[in-house]
Amino acid sequence: MKEFTGKTALITGGAGGIGMGLARLAAERQMNVVLADVQPDALERAVAELEERQCPTLGILIDTCQREQYEKLLETVQKRFGNIHLFFNNAGVVNAGKQVPIWDLPDADWSWVMGVNFYGILNGLQTVVPHMVAHGEEGHIVNTASIASFIPGGGPYGVSKFGVIHISEALALDLKKIDSKIRASVLCPGWVNTDIGDAERNRPRELRSEVNPDGQGLGIQQLLAGSKTPEDLAVHVYSAIENQQFYIFPHTGWDYMVREHYEAMLRRGEVYEFDLQAHVATRTSGQDI
């Protein structure tokens, strides 16, 4: 997909972070932009910003875990803009709690993170892809995973994002089998300067965890500070769309870890252990992490 002017982009998690970076670049490319998010105040601000840029914009409140809300979203978008051409399936959360063994993590953590990061992605695909395939126009779908997909010990976040990679690969192959004009990509960013470390603010009350945050969210935010901006990341994503690139790895500083992980699997030996502290130290040597 190389032509963007006048086309429509749907972005979940669109009111901030990576989603807003993608939206700003869509506005520059003279697209219609649909921002879907669970945060009403942030959504209102994001819509206002894009409208100031003279970008036709629609903001829709949605909990991506709820399939019926996706179906209503699709109806609303079609009434306003017609067909969807770019679908950034991007909404995601991370549980910021004490580091405990996976068997001690409460069901609430698993339900919330898997619900948004995996089933939210699935709900989007089950709702939006049939529409995109049916309208027959050129389009592209980008599912947001994470470099954490390849880091052992990530708990529900890593599990959910690993699932996104596999479902994205299946999506790409299924679209190819039917000779669709829709292409797919999976985005696996490293650290991006967003507020995902504060995602607990959006956790539903009924899924509150008894494992107290204990400041880990702040620690995540400190790691993300000084990383790539969402706008930097968006440039990589749109380039990948234009070049029909499936795997999008914007941060080259993590390449060695992905390679070592798969080499460990092929050796059929012990589980791969990743030294995060040593990796953090590479910031001082200019690594793109």
Image: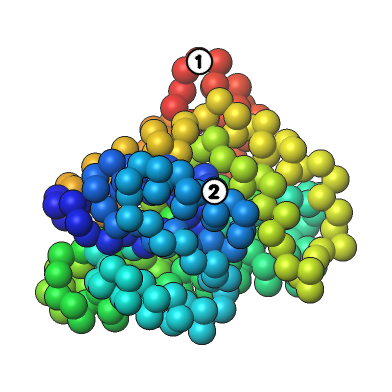
Q: State the residue at coordinates (54%, 35%).
A: 193
Tag 1 near tag 2, CB within 8 Å = no
Q: State the residue at coordinates (51%, 84%).
A: 68
Between tags 1 and 2, which lies in front?
Answer: 2
Question: Extreme top residue here?
Answer: 285
Q: Which residue is mark 2?
A: 45
Under mark 2, the amino acid is: Arg
Q: State the residue at coordinates (44%, 82%).
A: 71
Along the polypeptide, which appears first: circle 1 or circle 2?
A: 2
Left or right of residue 32, residue 272 in this image = right
Q: Which residue is mark 1?
A: 285
Vertical side of 268 occupied by 253: above or below: above
Q: State the residue at coordinates (63%, 32%).
A: 223
| Residue 32 in view | yes
Q: Position of residue 91 (x, y in %)?
A: 51, 59
Mark 1 Cα within 10 Å, few/some/many (few <14, many 20+)? few
Residue 256 occupies quadrant: top left
Residue 39 occupies quadrant: bottom right
Left or right of residue 189, residue 209 in this image = right
Q: Secondary structure at mark 1?
A: helix
Q: Secondary structure at mark 2?
A: helix
